[in-house]
Amino acid sequence: MTIEHAILGILSIRPMTGYDLKKVMQDSTYLHWSGNNNQIYKALLGLQEDGYVYSEVQHQESAPTKKQYTITQRGLNTLTQWSMLEPEAPECKKSFLAQLAFSGTLGNEELLTLITGYENTMWAQLQMCKERARRGGGLTPRSKREALLWEMIDNNIETGLTAELDWIRSLKERLSEAGMGKEGTHMQYEVHTQDQTKFIEVRAHASGLRTTQDAMDLISLCAEHDCGLMLLHEDALSTDFFQLKTGVAGEILQKLVNYRIRAAFVLKDISKLSVRFKEMMLEANKSNQYRFFDNRADAELWLMKGV
Amino acid sequence: MTIEHAILGILSIRPMTGYDLKKVMQDSTYLHWSGNNNQIYKALLGLQEDGYVYSEVQHQESAPTKKQYTITQRGLNTLTQWSMLEPEAPECKKSFLAQLAFSGTLGNEELLTLITGYENTMWAQLQMCKERARRGGGLTPRSKREALLWEMIDNNIETGLTAELDWIRSLKERLSEAGMGKEGTHMQYEVHTQDQTKFIEVRAHASGLRTTQDAMDLISLCAEHDCGLMLLHEDALSTDFFQLKTGVAGEILQKLVNYRIRAAFVLKDISKLSVRFKEMMLEANKSNQYRFFDNRADAELWLMKGV
DNA sequence: GAAAACATGTAAGCTGTTACATGATTCG
DNA sequence: CGAATCATGTAACAGCTTACATGTTTTC
């Protein structure tokens, strides 16, 4: 399968410009190209030369001129031919497996950090994939069958990621059975479920959230319980967290954003905090990723309702 | 992850030559390189230049001279560093999903053929993967932990493929619920289980096995029941099958071999067959892939025992 | 006597990536 | 006023693949 096929496929759904194609590819989970200009524009010129597509230049007032590409009958024929070709087996490059295979020089602790890192990455992928599926691919299905197929394609990626997460869990289990697992967690937390929505409440943390590793532990907690909402109490945080210059808060919040975790922080006495921290809180409370509250009830409300 | 890392990884298990490395890579499920000379030998020269490996030329009597590469301390350090790097997300190129996405111009029948083709391909992959896991990767684990990890790596590939097959089944189901599925099968068959081994017995076939499509149907039957053993009765075959010049037998047997299906054929009266067909049978009966018998009991015995 | 396996290398080419170059408009 | 979005393109390069080139030994 070449990028030309993918372009013909997309254009068969709806005519569009090179720029649009680029976006579709970037947003797509199953078109594995990065959506870089070089390839797309080059391929379009080639396809046009061979008569698979034609282009109409559209001069727009108050916008750049653009070239709208449309698939020709010849292009459609080629596409149909390609559609009927014997399917290729997927090719997966799981570099993590190689990393695991040659991790002999690592200690048990380091190995577990590695696996947890992978778990977190995969979980983030799953979240992103679900998000994308919710948004839809920017293309409208032309028939009921097409809608079903597209739904199942999204589902394919999702089940694949879920299978991977399940595998990670079984790997952890096997390791811990063999006495190479992790020690009891140093966090005091509960998992709540309300109206089919889960959230994790972290009441305390042995050392207080301070290092990147602590942030990763938080995320792997989310991954383990497949839960994207967190309620964090002040007692789980460290004093460094409240000193912006240490960068601890920034780093941890950034991790939460990266892994699409919505977090609500419950602080006991806001008036005691530094001016700079208060400013940061105000700014944060405009966003929908994490917020600060002075009581648990409000925090939970925002977490569950998103309001 | 570059091929250099993979090479360092393999050499950390055991010193070997470029040729050995090539074989290890080709046999491995998780090292995604084709194992081509160009890259391996070039990388080895580069690694040696930078002091990550060193080589010893071994002149062997009655064999070509070879260069045995060994990893240095520096190489080991680099490997350890790489091992601890944040794991990358796997990158999967499932071109079949793109094919599905743009299959709008295909009819329901053609779509189903496509999906079945994918099912068969994936099933073949699963069989190959299991075979490889049984053989082992040619490397000996140096510790219990390593053995466990390698086992789990094989298991990862297997669960991934199994998840894919499950997804295909659910896709077929959804399509048939929506009235776009396949008609009732035109084969008369039974699935037998004995001593935890399954085999499929095909007693009759509406049109008699004749086309490639018929062969593919056989294979998808195997894939559906996750079963690699078949017992085929003469009534399921067509007259063309017994005329070697038509190529029907060759084509169908080739497909069975490709998809790692062991098949036993039960023929009623061997004496009636043409001389050329008998020759072919004799030749075939030396192999372990498919055999011909004149009674069901012998056929089943060979199928189950492999003797 | 031919094919397969052992063993080391090179050349050419394809695919896809990042980064660069340009220029208009819109939004905060 | 700067950043982001729209829009089209180019240049250079990294990575990997197939195919070629060469020569020996073992196996069928």
Image: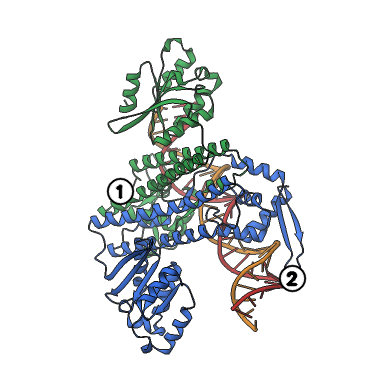
Chain colours: A blue, B green, C red, D orange
Any part of residue A148 in sight: yes
Residue topped by disc 2: A62
Tell me where residue A125 appears, x and y as whole percent.
45, 60
The answer to whether B120 is drawn above or below residue A234 in the figure is: above
What residue sits 39% from the left and 52% below the top? A163
Tell me where residue A108 appears, x and y as whole percent.
28, 62
Crowd around label 2: few <14 · some 14–19 · many ≥20 (10 Å)? few
Marked residue chain, label 2: A
Please name the amino acid that badge 2 sits on.
Ser
Q: What's the distance in space between the residues labelled 1 and 2, CA to CA?
A: 68 Å
User: Which of the numbered marks, if any, corresponds to residue B1?
Assistant: none
Tell me where residue A3 appears, x and y as whole percent.
61, 51
Marked residue chain, label 1: B
The answer to whether A139 is drawn above or below residue B191 in the figure is: below
What residue sits 33% from the left and 52% below the top? B14
Provide the secondary structure element on which disc 2 rests.
Answer: loop
Provide the secondary structure element on which disc 1 rests.
Answer: loop
In the picture, which quadrant includes the C terminus of chain B? top left
In the picture, which quadrant includes the N terminus of chain B? bottom left
Residue topped by disc 1: B140
The front one of A98 and A132 is A132
Please name the amino acid that badge 1 sits on.
Thr
The answer to whether A276 is drawn above or below residue C5 in the figure is: below
